[in-house]
Each structure stands twice: as structure tokens, then as C-alpha cells.
Amino acid sequence: MLCTHGTMIISTVNDIQSFPPFASLPSELLIEIFSTCSLTGDWHIPLTLSKVCRLWRDLIVSAPCIWQTIVVLESRRTMSSIRTQAELWVARSSPLPFNVVLKLTDFERLLPIMSCFLPNIARWMRCTITYDGRTFETSLSDLTLSSPRRMLHHLDILLKTPFEDVAGDDEDDVIFFSCGSATYRHISMRVATTKLPHTEMVNPLLFTSLDITETAFEYSVRSPDLLRFLAHCPNLEHLYFHGLSNDEGTLNAPPPSIALPRLHTLLLDQVCNQRSILSHLHLPALRELHLRHINVDYSLEPYHVSEEGDSDDESHDFSQSPHSDLHTGMGIRKLLSRSHPPLEILDMDLSDMRTKDFRWVFDKLSDLKQFSIVGSDMSDSVVALFMPFVVEDGDGERMSVRLPQLSVLKMYSCQQLSGDALVKALSARVHYTDHATPDATLTTVVISSCNDFTAGNAQELSWDLHDRLHVS
């Protein structure tokens, strides 16, 4: 009754009626036969069988087990066609679990195709991927053990040529991995690709954590492409972007502004497009901002528009990285102006700003509890910003401090500031906050490898900070 490819020889109602034994088969047996046919490898088998007659169509549409194996043959098919197939098979296999068999000719399409099934991760049992003679098989049920809840967690995107390591040591074949507790198992993905997929190809990616890493300049991500991709990640809580300090040049048009309402941790590492990224993110829940290895000592292309604050720094303080300082400071300004986040941790490792930007940012961060900076050219003018100052209002004069919630201050290898300025500013600060706001005063101060901070400065500052001061 079937050819080797699962195509029906009987194709009309009259054929069935002229073959009484087949027409008299019980529905349960027909469903079992159709389920077996769906495993033959041709993705369209259930659709083909459903066109034979009304009886078969009614049986096939009403039997979820026939739709449990979803075979995706990617070659020469549009993403729209694949997405339609995925939605139909997932819907008709409900409430049963389903398996995905993916036969790829272009590994760049892996993530877009996977995105069609990820919203139904709770029902996804097994995934088999075939590409370039390789077969990767993952049992998602084994990854989650006996956990009653299965949740999407982390997406790790490595921008590189897939399987470029001929020794096979790059782990590009590890697509899924898991972590979490016995109650909640987290499903995570690792994908190697040369570029972020076009947004029209991707369904919403409901991961809560995303790590994007560039490995070569030819795979660098321009900020508009990154932002458009992030628009498809609405549930993100953690975002880590590791670049290669590649200057993307001046943009021809402004990138899109993207809202990530749940994001509370952002890390930008070794990037030169920090201004464009920070200026176009709306992060109302951001609590931690980590900027690492962003300083560069060469010129960067100007931003595509001039904004208030772009003028020269009136303090004219020395900097080894004036262009990146400008972009970092202006990016943070725009982020804070747009989002007004309850930022609690600002970590700047070889990432600097101009003096005017430090002043502007410190005036805005009323919730900041921890400030850490490494390798900064900050001057005594910035150090003075930690001191109390006089504010005039309708009731007269009163004392205040910037960063009123600051409890942890860490400074490493800051060589342009003086020890005397640190002693003066921090002693004055704790004299005021220890009495005026004892629940919001400095509890930990770390000063390490700052050459102009002498043993005498440490001794003098310890009279006010006592065991809160840590010097190395």
C-alpha cells in the first residue's frame, strides 16, 4: 500500500472503497500505520495522507501521535515555510511531547529554526541535528532529569565559523546543556555562527541570559544589528557582550531604541560602540553595569549626531583615552536619562569617562551602593566629587553628598589622583555620613596599586575609616 518513500498508492476515496479489507480497518490501526509513516523522513507525510479522503483527514487531524515527529528539511525552504510547519506540527501534536529531526545544509539557520520550537520547550523531548555528515542528538528529557519544570535559561552565541577547529575540540556540537535545581531545570543553548541572524528570521527567544562573543574582526557586530537582535529577547535579565574593540565607524542612521524591561545586569567588554549600544537601550530595571577593557588610545569615528554634553571637558584633565572616554560617558548619560534605572553597582575596569561625565553621572545615581574602577585616569577633580557639599534650597543651606547610598568603593591602579586628595575627600565624607546617614555610609574602601597613595596617606585615612580601609 506504500512506496519506499511513504507516498500512498491509494489516493482516492474510490480506491479505498474498492479495497474492502483496507476500508474496514479499525481507526486505531490506521492511526498506528499513519504514525509509522510519519517516521519515514519526508516532512510532509501527514499532510499527504490527510488529502486522501475525509476519513483519513479526520483521523490524522485528531490524532496527536501522528504529529509527534517533526522532520525539518531546511534545504531550499524559506523560514516562513519552516515556521508554518513548526507551528502546525506543534499545535496538532498537543498535548503529547514531540521530537525534532533537523537536516541542515546551512548551519547559520540553526538558531532561527530552533526558535520555532523553543517556546514549547516543556514538550520538546529529543532533538536530532544532521549537518555536513555530522549528527548531534540530544535528549532534553535526560538533561532535565525528573524535574517537573523545564525553563529556558542561557543562550551562548559564539561568532565564528562553525566547526573551524578540525581537531573537533571547539565543542560546536554541544547545542544544549542544562543546570539548575531538582525542581527547576534550566535548558541552555550554545550556538556557533558567523553573524547574528536577521530579525525577520527569528521567533522571540525567551532566554533570560545571553552571552555574545566575537572571535575575529570579520565577525564583528555592528550596533544596529545587535540592537535589532536584542528586540527578539524580551525576557533577558543578564546580557554579556564580548567584543574585539572594532570601531564600527560613523553610522548612516540612528539605530533602533530597544526596551529590555527585565534586564538587571549588563556587561560590555572590549567594545568601541559602547555609546551607540548604551544610548539606544531602555533598561528600567538595570541594577548592575559592568564596563571592561573599553579604553582605547586611538581616535574613534565621531557619533552620528551631536548631543548636549559633546563639548570639550572644561576641566581639561589628562587622559590616555580621550575618544573612548567621551563615548563611554555620553553613552551612560543617555542610558540614565532614558531609563532612570535603580543602578546599584557600577564596575569600570579599564573603562573611563571625562571629569564632566563623572560629575553628571554621580549626580544621577542616587541608588548606587558599589563603585569599582580599575586603571582610570581620573583626576583629583573626580575624587573631590565624593566630598560633602552645600546645597541651597527654599529652607536655606544644607549639606549633601553625591552617591548617597554608596557603601563600597574600590579603586585599583588609578595613577593620576593624589593620595592627599583621597584622604581629604573620603575623610570628609565619612565624617558627615557616619553621623547624618549611618545606614548609608562607606563600609568598605579598597585602594590598591595607586602609586601616589602613600603609606602616610593610608595611616591618615585609617584614623577615620579604621578597619573599613583595605590598602595594597
Image (tube, helix red, strand yellow):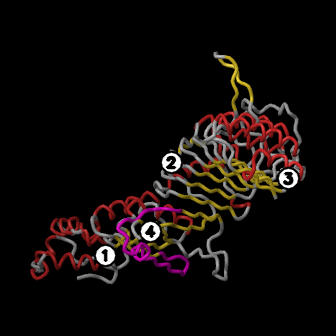
Give the Cα separation between the discs numbered 1 and 4: 36 Å
Q: Amino acid at mark 1?
A: Ser
Tell me, for residue 327, which label it has, or none: none
Give the Cα separation between the discs numbered 1 and 2: 41 Å
Query: Which quarter shows the C terminus?
Result: bottom right
The secondary structure type at the circle numbered 3 is loop
Q: Is residue 167 visible?
A: yes
Give the Cα separation between the discs numbered 3 and 2: 37 Å
Circle 2 packing at 10 Å, graded few (<14), some (14-19), many (20+), is some
Tell me, for residue 450, which label it has, or none: 3
Q: Amino acid at mark 4?
A: Ser
Tell me, for residue 181, which label it has, or none: 4
The picture places residue 395, in percent across and down from the top left corner, at 64, 16
Point out the stretch of residues depicted in magenta.
Answer: 129-154
The picture places residue 323, in percent across and down from the top left corner, at 81, 43
First in sequence: mark 1 or mark 3? Answer: 1
In this picture, is 367 found above or below 29? above
First in sequence: mark 3 or mark 4? Answer: 4
In this picture, is 305 found above or below 468? above
Q: Does 80 sit left or right of 456 as displayed?
A: left
Q: Nearer the viewer, residue 455 or 401?
A: 455
Residue corresponding to mark 1: 38
**Would residue 141 be counted in the magenta stretch?**
yes
| Residue at image point 48% right, 52% down | 235
Q: Nearer the viewer, mark 3 or mark 2?
A: 3
The secondary structure type at the circle numbered 1 is loop
Q: Nearer the viewer, mark 3 or mark 4?
A: 3
Q: How many marks?
A: 4
In this picture, is 391 found above or below 367? above
